[in-house]
């Protein structure tokens, strides 16, 4: 397996793990990542769809599966962490724009989490700028397709 395929799969694993965990656990253990903080604009910091359990399981799943994909667990955990940070950044921006949790914002929903992960891995894996850009775009396309499929399957609690 190539490094590029492994990186793409790890980003998809990090992104999808919180959705799968929520489908499995339901609304149990849904502690908001932002602790329910509401900013001066009257909107939540991140929103109800970003949870501690989702973030932690994304990091753990990416770290555990990375060796099976030919990468170190540290790279996997880094991808999970950076993906979750990027996802939180996009949620923060969406809340400031008045978009509800789960509202579709093509590009904003995919680019921060994939680009941040690839930028973190760039020096560690000697990735080229072309690889960073292509992997970010491939993640965006794959994520949009998978989001549509999970919504149709009833797994996504915020169908698009």
Image (cartoon, rainbow, N blue to C red):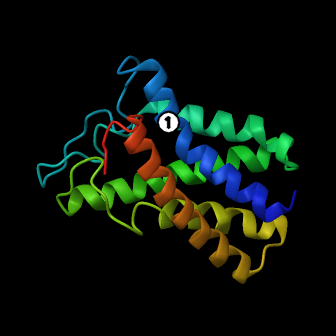
Side of 73 relative to 130 (left or right): right
Place of residue 24 in the rendered image (x, y in percent of width and height, measured from the top left): 48, 21
Q: Residues within 10 Å of mark 1 (few under 14, many from 20)?
A: many
The mark total stands at 1
Side of 106 relative to 60 (left or right): left
Q: Residue at x 30, y 48 (%)?
A: 102
SS under mark 1: helix
Q: Residue at x 45, y 19 (%)?
A: 25
Work out which quarter of the rendered image holds the N terminus and state it.
Answer: bottom right
Q: Is residue 103 above or below residue 22?
A: below
Residue 58 found in image quarter: top right
Side of 119 relative to 27 (left or right): right
Place of residue 33 in the rendered image (x, y in percent of width and height, measured from the top left): 39, 36
Q: Is residue 105 above or below residue 73?
A: below
Q: Residue at x 28, y 59 (%)?
A: 94
Q: Residue at x 49, y 57 (%)?
A: 145
Residue sitting nearer the eye, 112 or 7: 7
Q: Which residue is mark 1?
A: 18
Q: Residue furthest front?
A: 152
């Amino acid at each position: 397996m190539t490094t590029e395929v492994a990186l793409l799969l790890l980003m998809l694993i990090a992104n999808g793990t919180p959705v799968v965990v929520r489908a499995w656990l339901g609304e149990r253990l849904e502690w908001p990542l932002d602790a329910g903080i509401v900013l001066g604009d009257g909107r939540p910091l991140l929103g109800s769809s970003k949870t501690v359990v989702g973030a932690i399981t994304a990091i753990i799943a990416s770290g555990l599966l990375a060796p099976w994909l030919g990468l170190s667990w540290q790279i996997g955990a880094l991808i999970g962490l950076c993906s979750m940070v990027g996802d939180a950044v996009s949620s923060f921006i969406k809340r400031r724009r008045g978009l509800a949790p789960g509202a579709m914002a093509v590009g904003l929903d995919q680019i921060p989490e994939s680009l941040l992960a690839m930028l973190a891995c760039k020096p560690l894996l000697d990735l080229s700028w072309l690889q960073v850009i292509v992997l970010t775009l491939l993640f965006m396309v794959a994520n949009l397709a998978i989001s549509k499929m999970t919504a149709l399957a009833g797994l996504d609690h915020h169908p698009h």
